[in-house]
Image (spheres, grey):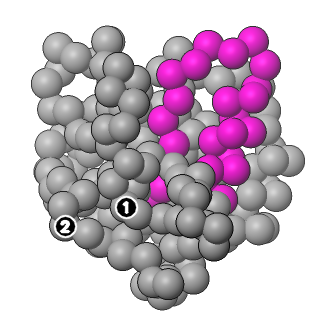
Amino acid sequence: MSINFFDECCQTKTNQSKFGLCDDSSLPNSPAYIDIDPSNEETQWVAIVDNNNEIELTFTAIDNCIKINRKDGKMDNRCDGMIIYQNHIIFVELKERNYRNSVWIEEGEQQLKNIIYLFIENNNIANYQSKKAYIANRKKPDYQFSRKEIMQKFRNETGFILLIQNIIKI
């Protein structure tokens, strides 16, 4: 079964120099979205996209928008979205949890890996020169611990650079 990761109904384009990615937890079945209102930065933006060169990019909501089922018919784990511009692709998992441990990182890593593998099965990954994946957590924006081993393993397994921070630089 082919998965359409480019469904226009799930996409938003922008060239804003700075905007947020949001995942409204009060609406559990709603997809992630772009927010350009700077007054929402502290309260709603889970990740901050720094697009200083104002490059036009496309954000595609994946979770709760792109239909991805396992072979048993149940919904598969999905990351929140992806950003594509020029020959760059970035998958994003948004977290708003204040865990004392790194469970949120492990959950995010699994969701990203799952979507990356599915994307590679359905698309030509060679079209993208730069491949990154972000786990962003508004409650822990500056994750202090080194995760070099996990990040290297992630890159070896997926071909994507894993970053654990809530600022996404374009």
* Residue 69 x, y percent position in the rendering: 53, 65
Horizontally, residue 77 falls left or right of residue 55, namely right
Q: Amino acid at mark 1?
A: Ile
Number of the label disc, if any, that sits on residue 66: 1
**Up/down of 66 relative to 33, above or below:** below
Q: Which residue is rendered at x = 45% and y = 83% of the image? A: 2
Q: Earlier in the sequence, mark 1 or mark 2?
A: 2
Q: Residue furthest right?
A: 149
**Up/down of 110 relative to 38, above or below:** below
Q: Which residue is label 2 attached to?
A: 8
Number of the label disc, if any, that sits on residue 152: none
Q: Which residue is rendered at x = 28% and y = 54% of the image? A: 59
Q: Which residue is rendered at x = 17% and y = 21% of the image? A: 38
**Up/down of 129 relative to 34, above or below:** below
Range drawn in magenta: 90-113
Q: Quadrant of residue 29?
A: top left
Horizontally, residue 163 falls left or right of residue 19, namely right
Residue count near mark 2 (Cα–Cα under 10 Å), binned few <14, some 14–19, many ≥20: few
* Residue 160 x, y percent position in the rendering: 62, 64
Q: Classify mark 2: helix, strand or loop.
A: helix
* Residue 152 x, y percent position in the rendering: 79, 56
- Say whether residue 50 is visible: no
* Residue 60 x, y percent position in the rendering: 31, 57
Magenta-colored stretch includes residue 95: yes
Count of numbered circles in the view: 2
